[in-house]
Amino acid sequence: MYILLLLLWIILNGQLTWEVAAFGIVIAGVMYGFVCKFLDYSIEKDILLFRKLPYILAYILILIWEIIKANVSAIRLALSYRNEVDPVIVKFRTDLKTDIAKVVLANSITLTPGTITIKLEGSELVVHALDAELVEGIDESVFVHMLRRMEEMDEAYMQKRRSQHE
């Protein structure tokens, strides 16, 4: 987070001089201290985020690939000789535990063309799709598996942290 704040300072300044860098180091440090004190952030969360970075990058790449595949499917559906589109609404429950993971899943579904998350309430998602083929296996998609893995990393880290404090 500190490095991101520093980079943001440099980018918004528009130039890189010794004075801008020195002042940016101080300002980024103050902002980081503020975030840690008042917004429930910590160095441990930075470390966890750094450990999850390969999974996050892989998730983004898979999301891009799934968007491309869904684009092709939606275009094929729109240009097919089939006269009728068969829209469906699918309800399913997810076993993801954190609200962040559920929201990321809902947004990932919405970002893929041909599907949109209508509702996310608790662990239940309601998804509208242009065709039933676009939502096949959505409850156990690659998104769910990757988010579940990241949640497991969070849980393992929190258990380790709790055991260190005891």
Image (tube, rainbow, N blue to C red):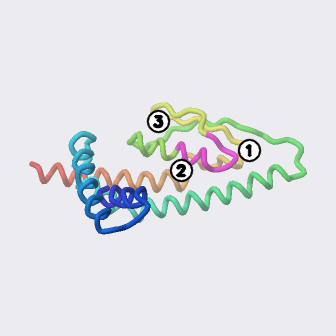
Query: Do the CB atoms of the residues marked 2 and 3 lie less than 8 Å apart?
Result: no
The residue lying toward the viewer, choosing from 126 and 21, is 21
In the rendered structure, find residue 21 and report the number of the disc placed on it: none
Q: Residues within 10 Å of mark 3 (few under 14, many from 20)?
A: some
**Which of 132 and 38 lies nearest the eye of the viewer?**
38
Q: Are marks 2 and 1 in contact (CB under 8 Å)?
A: no
Of circles 2 and 3, which is in front?
3
The CA distance from mark 2 to mark 3 is 14 Å
Q: Position of residue 153 (x, y in %)?
A: 33, 56
Q: Amino acid at mark 2?
A: Glu
- Give the label on residue 131, or none: 1
Indicate which disc, 3 or 1, sits on the residue closer to the N terminus. 3
Q: CA distance from mark 2 to mark 1?
A: 18 Å
From this view, report whether residue 67 is shown above or below residue 123.
Answer: below
Q: Is residue 109 magenta?
A: yes
Q: Image quadrant for the N terminus?
A: bottom left
Residue pointed to by mark 2: 140
Q: Is residue 96 magenta?
A: no
Q: Which residue does the numbered mark 3 point to in the structure image? A: 123
Identify which amino acid the numbered label 3 is placed on. Ser
The part of the chain drawn in magenta is: 106-116
- Tell me what residue is drawn at x 24 percent, y 45 percent: 34
Q: CA distance from mark 3 to mark 1?
A: 23 Å
